[in-house]
Image (tube, rainbow, N blue to C red):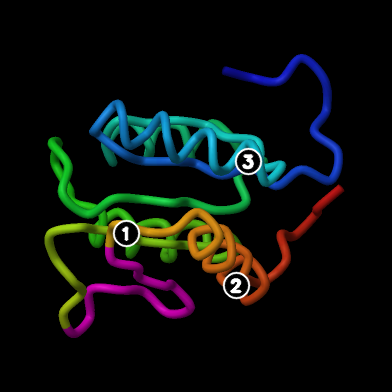
Amino acid sequence: MKPHRRIVNQPVVLLVEDEPLVRLTQVDILKESEFWVVEAQDADEAFELLKSRPEIDAILTDVDMPGSMDGFEFARLVRQGWPEVAVLVISGKTGPGPGDLPPNAKFLHKPIMPDDLIAALQEVMAKRPQKSGAV
């Protein structure tokens, strides 16, 4: 869903989660904290959205998803192609191994308290380089 007007002072988060109820809960948490949310059910869909949506400031991705790549691979791809996009990876099943997380990314284990999720997202966003040509 694209906004009808320009987003002012509202960070845009690309949420990548294949479980509908988990995604719905995370959308509510993010919106209550005044983030604009773009949703994807897997990394393949998220990659296409990222290519077409330059306003995305951060990704919040699960690890275990259907499709051609998991959340760790997607996070590394984002860091290579979009170094100015903040990366937060979450999972309730698996943790990162050596080299799984790109630089300046953060990992959280599910379940996550809403305040902890928002704090981690704000932390990775504070560490990212600024977008060139930002308006």
Q: Residue at x 42, y 79 (%)?
A: 103
Which mark is on residue 54? Answer: 3
Check disc 1: other Cα within 10 Å, few if <14, some if 14-19, many if 20+. Answer: many
Q: Secondary structure at mark 3?
A: loop
Q: Are marks 3 and 1 in contact (CB under 8 Å)?
A: no
What residue is pinned by disc 1? 90
Q: Amino acid at mark 1?
A: Ile
Residue bounds of the magenta highlight: 98-109
In this rendered view, identify the residue nearer to me: 87 or 73: 87
In this rendered view, identify the residue nearer to me: 103 or 63: 63
Would you identify the image quadrant in which residue 39 lies? top left
Q: Secondary structure at mark 1?
A: strand
Check disc 3: other Cα within 10 Å, few if <14, some if 14-19, many if 20+. Answer: few
Question: How far across and how far down the image is residue 5, in percent?
Answer: 82, 20
Q: Indicate whether residue 64 is drawn in magenta.
A: no
3 sits left or right of 116 in the view: right
80 sits left or right of 28 in the view: left
Q: Residue at x 18, y 85 (%)?
A: 98
Q: Amino acid at mark 2?
A: Glu
